[in-house]
Structure formats: structure tokens, C-alpha cells
Image: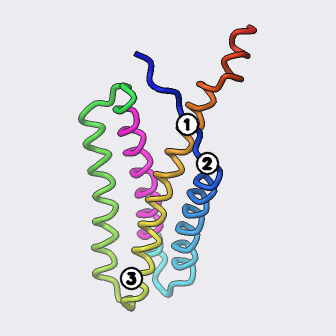
Amino acid sequence: MKPPPAQRPTSAFIGASWSALFIGALAYLIGLWNAPMPLNEKGYYFTLLMYGLFSAVSLQKSVRDRLEGIPVTGLYFGLCWLSLGLAVLLLAVGLWNASFAPSEKGFYAMSFILSLFAAVAVQKNVRDMARWREDSPAHEAKDNES
């Protein structure tokens, strides 16, 4: 059974997703750049952002693969969930123990979560656009000509 044809995400949603990703990640990174903390601590928070973004995108891809009938092992699926949970937990522990003002802690937490959410939305849009291009009549006409 062939899945229903893909719908193209709106330009507004695509733009909002990319904007949220850039704003969240850039705000987080600017905050790190300006923070009066040792370089190793900045590295910890930077690594958490990169790890969190990767794990969020990997989890989204795994969920989508399963929905489309593409095999994903339970082990990998579980590792994706574990990785995302660890990234959030490690950020929470780091901020809990940090000597930041409460407003700074909130800033890092919110920009981190915004970045994770936006990364999932961007990954969804990329996947939807790829599928839409495969299903579009113009693409099918080109395939039939060759």
C-alpha cells in the first residue's frame, strides 16, 4: 500500500523553524561567549547543545522512519530517547549547580529547549520537502521521460 502523497510544508513554517533554530542556538552561544566562566565550563555547555541537537534530530528521524515503515531497531530507538533525556538532564544538573543568577539559568534552559524543538521542526521540514519532491507531478514527469 502506497502512503498518501506528501504535503509541502508552508514557507512560513519553514522560515519560522529555521529562524527559531538560529535564534535559539545563537542566543545560547552568545550567552556562552559573554559568560564569565572558565573555558572548560563553556565547553561543557557547548557540547551539551551539540549533543542535544543531534539526539533530537536522530530521535525525530527514528520516529518518522517507524511511521513510514522503515525498520529502526528497538536498541537504536531507545538510545535516541536516552540520548535526548541525558542531554536535558545534564543541562539541568549543570544549571542547578551553576553559580548563575536565576534569570541566566532560565535563559540557558529556554534557548536550549527552543533549539531542540526547532531542530526537530527543521528536520521534519527537510524530510517533508524531500518526500514532496519525490511525489510531485513535475518530478514524476521527468522520470517518465527518461
Disc 3 is placed on an element classified as helix
The residue that appears at 32% across and 75% down in the rendered structure is 94
Rendered image coloring scheme? rainbow
Residue 38: percent from left, percent from top:
46, 81
Residue 81: percent from left, percent from top:
29, 49
Residue 26: percent from left, percent from top:
58, 69
Q: CA distance from mark 3 to mark 1?
A: 39 Å
The residue that appears at 44% across and 18% down in the rendered structure is 2
Q: Residue furthest bottom?
A: 101
Q: Which mark is residue 105?
A: 3
Disc 2 is placed on an element classified as loop
Q: Nearer the viewer, residue 111 or 6?
A: 6
Q: Quadrant of residue 60?
A: top left
- Residue type at tag 3: Lys
Which residue is denoted by mark 2 in the rendering? 10
Horizontal relation, residue 66 to residue 140: left or right: left
Q: CA distance from mark 3 to mark 2?
A: 34 Å
> Magenta segment: does it hold 49?
yes
Which residue is denoted by mark 1 in the rendering? 7
Q: Quadrant of residue 7?
A: top right
- Residue type at tag 2: Thr
Magenta residues (range): 44-65
The residue that appears at 59% across and 33% down in the rendered structure is 130
Q: Nearer the viewer, residue 109 or 124?
A: 124
Which circle's residue, 3 or 1, is located before the other in the chain?
A: 1
- Residue type at tag 1: Gln
